[in-house]
Amino acid sequence: MKILMVCLGNICRSPLAEGILKQKVFENGLDWHVDSAGTSGYHAGELPDPRSIDVANKHGLDITDQKSRQFLSRDLDQFDVIYAMDTSNYRNILRLAQTPEEEAKVEIIMNMSRPGINQIVPDPYYGNDGFENVYQMLDEACDAIIEKYK
Ligand code: 4NP
């Protein structure tokens, strides 16, 4: 499996999603490739937001090996599943899809554990207290991803 996590900046939500899923992939002895990207290039080349690094650390994860990068249309070819954190990311990714097969790879991540309701992972960038909630939501969704594809 090749799985890509996508948010807007690739510094808050999708780096956490990448780190959480990579840890579960490791714990389950799976041979998956997990990466993340942002629909914008605003923060390309940057480390994850310090608040994401802190909440990851609190849960025993180190995400400081990650660097923000922009989502590319070829990611739709190269990955098996692409998880959007919210509906805006979802629409922006779908806009770049060139075939029905590519469109079918894109899903809103919370539909994995809370199917059919298109719940979003709220953007925590402008607040200060959203990061633990984001972590808990992504931890739940990543458990469901492991169960579905392992
Ligand atoms: P993310 O959060 O999409 O979870 O990485 C954001 C990061 C940066 C900005 C917005 C959201 N920004 O506008 O710079």
Image (spheres, rainbow, N blue to C red):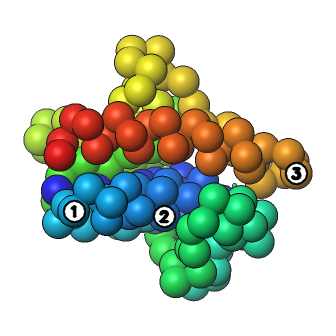
Q: Residue 113 carries which label?
A: none
Disc 2, disc 3: CB below 8 Å?
no
**Residue indicated by mark 1:** 29
Q: Residue at x 59, y 81 (%)?
A: 64
> Quick one: which residue is furthest to the top in this view?
116
The image quadrant of residue 148 is top left
Labels 2 and 3: the sequence-earlier one? 2
CA separation in Å, label 2 and label 3:
20 Å
CA separation in Å, label 1 and label 3:
35 Å
Q: Residue 63, relative to residue 117: is it above or below?
A: below
Give left or right: position of 124 versus 40: right
Q: Which of 77 and 18 is in front in this view?
A: 18
Labels 1 and 3: the sequence-earlier one? 1
**Residue 139 at what x, y percent from top left?**
51, 44
Q: Residue 150, relative to residue 42: is it above or below?
A: above
Labels 2 and 1: the sequence-earlier one? 2
The reply to whether residue 54 is visible in this rendering is yes
Q: What element carries label 1?
A: loop
Q: Is mark 3 on a helix, strand or loop?
A: loop
Q: Which mark is residue 19?
A: 2
The image quadrant of residue 79 is bottom left
**Residue indicated by mark 3:** 128
